Image (cartoon, rainbow, N blue to C red):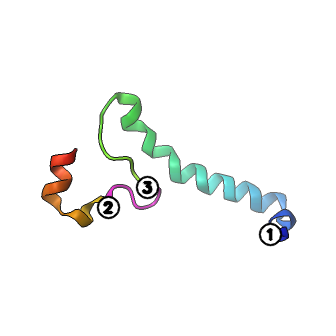
Amino acid sequence: MGYFLYFSAETWTLLVAFVTYAYWPYGTFKKLGISGPKPVPFFGTMLHYRRGFFNFDQEC
């Protein structure tokens, strides 16, 4: 747990930039008022396809 405090400023900056880059594009449809499943960073809605394409399309 104490290892997190020893990261350099550059590492923290890159980590914040990486997380921001992961979440940034997923707010676009929400801002436009388009409903749909909430995407997961880096996977999008791909994980929802496990239930099948037909069920996924019916839920959206």
Q: The residue under label 2 is which amino acid type?
A: Met
Q: Nearer the viewer, mark 3 or mark 1?
A: 1
Locate the N terminus and report the quarter of the image it occupies. bottom right
Report if residue 59 lies within the magenta region.
Answer: no
- Label located before the other in sequence (3 or 1): 1
Q: Which residue is labeled 1 in the image? A: 1
The part of the chain drawn in magenta is: 40-47
Q: Residue at x 68, y 59 (%)?
A: 15
Residue 9 quadrant: bottom right
Mark 1: amino acid: Met
* Image-based side of 20 in relation to 48, left or right: right
Left or right: 20, with 37 as reference point: right
Disc marking residue 40: 3
Q: Position of residue 8 (x, y in %)?
A: 84, 63
Distance from label 2 to label 1 (Cα)?
Answer: 32 Å
- Residue at 39 percent across and 34 percent down: it is 30
Q: CA distance from mark 3 to mark 1?
A: 26 Å
Q: Which mark is residue 46?
A: 2
Rate crowding at label 2 as few (under 14), some (14 to 19) or many (20 or more) other CA atoms within 10 Å. few
Q: Nearer the viewer, residue 1 or 41?
A: 1
The residue shown at (38%, 47%) is 38
Q: On residue 10, which mark appears?
A: none
x 76%, y 58%: residue? 12
Tell me if mark 1 has few (under 14), some (14-19) or many (20+) residues whose alpha carbon lies within 10 angstroms of its own. few
Figure check: 5 above or below 39 = below
Crowd tier of the residue under label 3, counting other residues whose Cα lies within 10 Å: few below 14, some 14–19, many 20 or above? some
